[in-house]
Amino acid sequence: MGFSLGMVLLSLIQLYSFIVLVWCLLSWFPNIRWYDQPFKALDMAVRPVCEPLRRVLPAMGGIDFSPMILMVILQVIAGFVRNIP
């Protein structure tokens, strides 16, 4: 199996999906200091991508669905990347 751009893109999408998942799980802990490293870098990687989604779909009942929508979008993109010959 050769090295391809599709495999690299798919790996990057999977890595970013994992980063979003970790960011979501860490948000459950109120004592996390997001201005300290490595949390600041994690927050800087995810928050700018979630912000436009938050503007379109604001939090409902105090629950922010933007990370979940982001994960769905990433999986759809990954599906397209998998189908590229």
Image: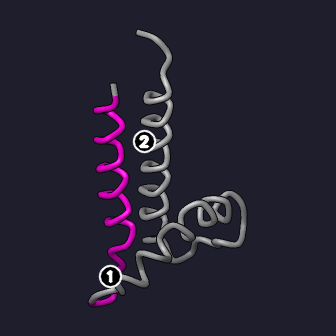
The residue that disc 1 covers is 63
On the picture, is 69 further left or further right than 31?
A: left
Quarter of the image with the C terminus is: top left
- Secondary structure at badge 2 equals helix
The residue shown at (58%, 71%) is 32
Q: Nearer the viewer, residue 80 or 53?
A: 80
Res 14 label: 2
Q: Position of residue 21 (x, y in %)?
A: 41, 56
Q: Nearer the viewer, residue 3 or 26?
A: 3
Q: Which residues are magenta?
A: 61-84
Image vertical order of residue 74 relative to residue 48, above or below:
above
Q: Position of residue 80 (x, y in %)?
A: 31, 41
On the picture, is 37 further left or further right than 50?
A: right
The amino acid sitting under disc 2 is: Gln
Q: Position of residue 84 (x, y in %)?
A: 34, 31
The residue shown at (34%, 86%) is 59
Q: Quadrant of residue 6?
A: top left
Q: Nearer the viewer, mark 1 or mark 2?
A: 2
Image vertical order of residue 74 relative to residue 24, above or below:
above
Mark 1 vs mark 2, CA separation in Å: 24 Å
Magenta residues: mostly which secondary structure? Answer: helix
Image vertical order of residue 62 relative to residue 64, above or below:
below
Q: Is 62 covered by the magenta stretch? A: yes
Quarter of the image with the N terminus is: top left
- Secondary structure at badge 1 equals loop
The amino acid sitting under disc 1 is: Ile
